[in-house]
Image (tube, rainbow, N blue to C red):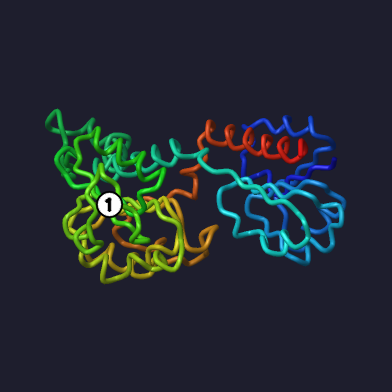
């Protein structure tokens, strides 16, 4: 068996990939451009891909291809219908990053609520050294306890965040993007009620017809002054142009780990907001704790072993 990982860089350099050598000849490419894909896997039997697209043209050009392992949950980078037609198995992985994404959600929320960046910067620039009193309360912060925490997308990750928010003493409510989710533990509310009453709103939903542009200019305008909005779901759920505009017009605090186009495009409007203290952007890392990436590779290896056993 020849196994090729097309974009190993997406796993970082601190994760051991040697477990794949037990299946046969294993090759890695840090990145693979679309024009390089066929050349990289021309004679491969098994392909690992995180975001590299495997389309019909690629499959036709790779006659030995038997299994495509997507090192993620989403499989939108693979032509599933054509793979099925060709008899090529496609396997993804789910559930490996729940704790990591939930933890990142809380990290973003606490940093935005507590203004950690401002206070850290104040001290490191000598502000506390020259202060006239023992404390410096320039930026007001508040407690999660007793506040309403709204969750958009109460799936596995959303429920994990709900548990943590409840432990902080928040009242958790949720909005079902499909309209079909009913959870006995938490109150289901309309999006309008959530926007108007929640101090924290976190997004854990997939991008689909129901969620595309869900948080638009009107939705942002209806949010409570001083509230926090975090998206660790998918880019495209929030209108980023409207978001960049309202950050400078209204006191909203925004945490983003995902954007509609990734990597971030040059000249993105969020790079030039005046109130940059109201915004934290991380480069799609919520899924990527060491533990999550280690589990991901182990589960991919299990998918390969299961395929080979059959």
10 Å crowding of disc 1: few (<14), some (14-19), many (20+): many
Quadrant in the rendering for residue 296: top right
Q: In the rendered image, which residue does mark 1 sit on?
A: 174
Residue placed most toward the observer, 193 or 199: 193
Residue 258, given in percent of the width and then of the height, sits at: 46, 55
| Left or right side of 237 for 14 | right
> How far from the left and from the top, in percent, is residue 64?
86, 52
Residue in view at x 20 percent, y 53 percent: 198
Give left or right: position of 248 versus 137. right
Q: Is residue 29 above or below residue 61?
A: above
Of all residues, the one furthest to the front in this rendering is 310
Say which of 308 and 157 sits in front: 308
Above-or-below relation of 136 to 153: above
The count of marks equals 1
Secondary element type, mark 1: strand
Instruction: Give the residue drawn at x 31%, y 40%.
Output: 121
Q: Residue 251 lies in what quarter of the image?
A: bottom left
Residue 134 position in % (x across, y down): 14, 28
Q: Residue at x 44, y 64 (%)?
A: 236
Name the residue located 59 percent from the left edge and 43 percent from the top edge: 93
Q: Quadrant of the C terminus?
A: top right
Q: Quadrant of the N terminus?
A: top right
Q: Is residue 243 above or below residue 68?
A: below
Q: Position of residue 242 (x, y in %)?
A: 33, 70
Residue 108 vs residue 265: left or right? Answer: left
Front one among 92 and 37: 92
């Amino acid at each position: 068996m020849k196994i090729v990982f097309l974009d190993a860089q997406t796993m970082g350099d601190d994760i051991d990939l040697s477990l794949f050598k037990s299946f046969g000849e294993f090759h890695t490419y840090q990145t693979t451009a679309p024009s390089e894909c066929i050349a990289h896997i021309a004679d491969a039997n098994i392909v690992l891909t995180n975001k590299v697209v495997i389309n019909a043209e690629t499959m036709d050009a790779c006659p030995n291809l038997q299994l495509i392992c997507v090192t993620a949950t989403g499989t939108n980078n693979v032509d599933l219908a054509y793979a099925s037609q060709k008899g090529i198995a496609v396997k993804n992985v789910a559930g490996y990053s729940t704790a990591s994404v939930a933890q990142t959600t809380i990290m973003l929320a606490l940093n935005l609520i507590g203004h950690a960046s401002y206070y850290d910067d104040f001290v490191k620039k000598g502000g506390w050294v020259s202060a006239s009193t023992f404390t410096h309360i320039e930026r007001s912060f508040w407690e999660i306890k007793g506040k309403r925490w709204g969750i958009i997308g109460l799936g596995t990750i959303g429920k994990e965040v709900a548990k943590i928010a409840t432990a902080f003493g928040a009242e958790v409510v949720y909005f079902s993007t499909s309209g079909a989710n009913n959870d006995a533990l938490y109150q289901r509310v309309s999006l309008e009620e959530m926007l108007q009453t929640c101090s924290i709103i976190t997004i854990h939903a997939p991008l689909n017809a129901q969620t595309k542009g869900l948080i638009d200019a009107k939705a942002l305008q209806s949010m409570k002054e001083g509230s926090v909005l975090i998206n660790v779901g998918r880019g495209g759920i929030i209108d980023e142009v409207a978001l960049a505009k309202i950050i400078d017009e209204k006191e909203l605090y925004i945490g983003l780990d995902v954007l509609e186009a990734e990597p971030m495009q040059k000249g993105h409007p969020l790079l030039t907001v005046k109130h940059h203290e109201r915004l934290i952007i991380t480069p799609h890392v919520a899924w990527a704790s060491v533990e999550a990436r280690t589990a991901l590779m182990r589960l991919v290896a299990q998918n390969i072993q299961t395929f080979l056993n059959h």
